[in-house]
Image: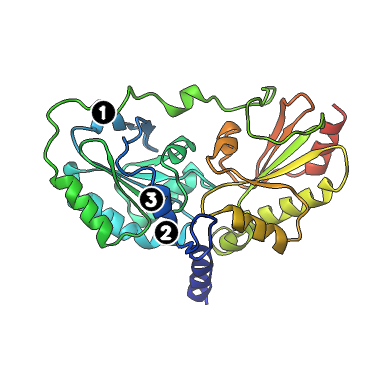
Amino acid sequence: MFKLLTAALLLSLSTMPTQADEAGSGSSRARMAGKALIGQAGPAAVLQTIDGQRLDLAAMYGKKPVYLKFWATWCVPCREQMPAFEKSFRQYGERLAVVAVNAGYSDTEAQVKGYRARHGLHMPIVIDDGSLAASLNLRVTPQHIVIGRDGRIQHVGHLHDKELEQALQRAVDERAVASPLPLAPQAVPATAARPVLRAGDVAHGLPLPGADGKPRVLMFFSPWCESYLRESRPATAQACQRVREEAEALSATPGTAWLAVASPVWSSEKELAEFARSKKSRLPMRLDKDGVLFNAFGVRQIPSIVLLDRQGRVARVMGPDERGLAQAVQALQVQ
């Protein structure tokens, strides 16, 4: 029964249509995401593994190719591909820099470490803060990025298939680069230029609709949370439903501007509209295409609520396990 449910959930997720891609499969989404990336310079990011190791991607360019794989512990195809991923890490050894990039979306460090222990993974693992995903146009999990020895992105894909294997082998077989590359700029932590907004900070310059002087409530979620995570993350799925239903009820009361913000991972504007229709939702919804809003407020868990006062200051950020949304909104209105 579990296998049948998992297969049904995976099929429904992998065939979701997108506005720019009618097929909607994981492979086609990754292909669309990679169109603007192929041939471009790899990101100059400094990553830290869950074991405290520092990985400077820019310092690797010119010396060895890099294989980044975005994944999540709740992702069914990620789980299915993990044995092949571990095999690639062992097969290429020092000839290829292999990094498992947990998307950092609805995952915690404890969950990632537990997953590593259960599945016997040995490659370096980092947890993204959203900045690497934004720079590499993350749209699905898993999403594979192969960066050649010259520092240019050569392959973006979803499946661990013959195409990926060929891309890895080509990258490893490339001749060494004799001179430093002009492609990779000085590597700096991606978060250094974009500090996360905390309580008391003013949220200015963000793509938010006008609130007419009202306090604002942002609900961060994914349209597939209530359905896809029902098996792998039932508590999260229940929290998504609870918060959405509470937000629907509270948004009917005047005095506060509401906006539901959806992550672009496994989501499109068309899917978001279909979700709103299926739930008969009155909440205004926006797809955070570039992850700007998720990253601005440091939202990595769904559902999350961000409350902004009349001046646009962050009043409070509420995570999936926090209760008392009605009281928080009431307190916001009297400020």
Amino acid type, mark 3: Arg
CB contact under 8 Å: marks 3 and 1: no
Residue 128 occupies which quadrant of the picture?
top left
Q: Is residue 170 above or below residue 12?
A: above
Instruction: Please say whether residue 142 is visible from this viewpoint.
Output: no
What is the secondary structure assignment of the residue under circle 1?
Answer: helix
Residue 98 occupies which quadrant of the picture?
top left
Where residue 76 is drawn, which disc sits there? none
Residue identified by numbered label 2 = 28
Residue identified by numbered label 3 = 116
Q: CA distance from mark 3 to mark 1?
A: 26 Å
Residue 270, image x, y percentages: 60, 57
Question: Which mark lies nearer to you, 3 or 1?
Answer: 1
Q: Residues within 10 Å of mark 3 (few under 14, many from 20)?
A: some
Question: Which mark lies nearer to you, 2 or 1?
Answer: 2
Where residue 59 is drawn, which disc sits there? 1
